[in-house]
Amino acid sequence: AIQKGEDNAAALSATIEELSTQRNEHDEKIQAAQEAIVGHKKEQSEADAARAATKKEYDANAADLKAALDALTGAIKTLKASKAPPSLAQVSGISATLRTAAGLADALGLPGAEAAGKAVALLQQPANEVQMQD
């Protein structure tokens, strides 16, 4: 009976030691996972900040484009509303709007911005005034 108790105690001690070792291994895995979580949270925070900056830039560009489109729409309506061919004053007024739109398109790197800039440059050229004979 004594021998049986001692054997049982030795078996239980071995089981306790084995389980203790397993627990230490799991504790190490938990610690590594917690450190990984901290690292991922930091990366997520940095990514969120980068996306916020990108969105801010996008929103600013979208607002600029909307303003340019509104200006162009207004210019087109002005030209269509006039029954007579557009006067030099109207063309000059619209050229300022077109310059703004072309500048925004160029700054945003939109396709066709170079062609729009050339068209605006034509509008900016001084009129060739030929003196009339009396």
Image (cartoon, grey):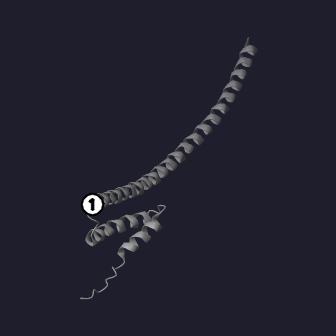
Q: Nearer the viewer, residue 126 or 34?
A: 126
Left-right relation of 100 to 13: left
The location of residue 38, given as percent across then percent down, is 52, 45
Left-right relation of 1 to 95: right
| In the depicted structure, whether residue 69 falls above or below residue 99 | above
**Residue found at x 46% / y 49%:** 48
**Residue found at x 34% / y 60%:** 72
Question: What kind of residue is marked 1?
Answer: Thr
Q: Which quarter of the image is occupied by the N terminus?
A: top right
**Residue found at x 48% / y 52%:** 46
Outermost residue, left direction? Answer: 134
When asked about the image quadrant of residue 10, the answer is top right
The location of residue 74, given as percent across then percent down, is 29, 58
When asked about the image quadrant of residue 129, the answer is bottom left
Badge 1: residue crowd in 10 Å (few <14, some 14–19, many ≥20): some
Q: Nearer the viewer, residue 36 or 72?
A: 72
In the rendered image, which residue does mark 1 sit on? 78
When asked about the image quadrant of residue 73, the answer is bottom left
The location of residue 33, given as percent across then percent down, is 58, 40
Outermost residue, bottom direction? Answer: 134
The location of residue 34, given as percent across then percent down, is 55, 41
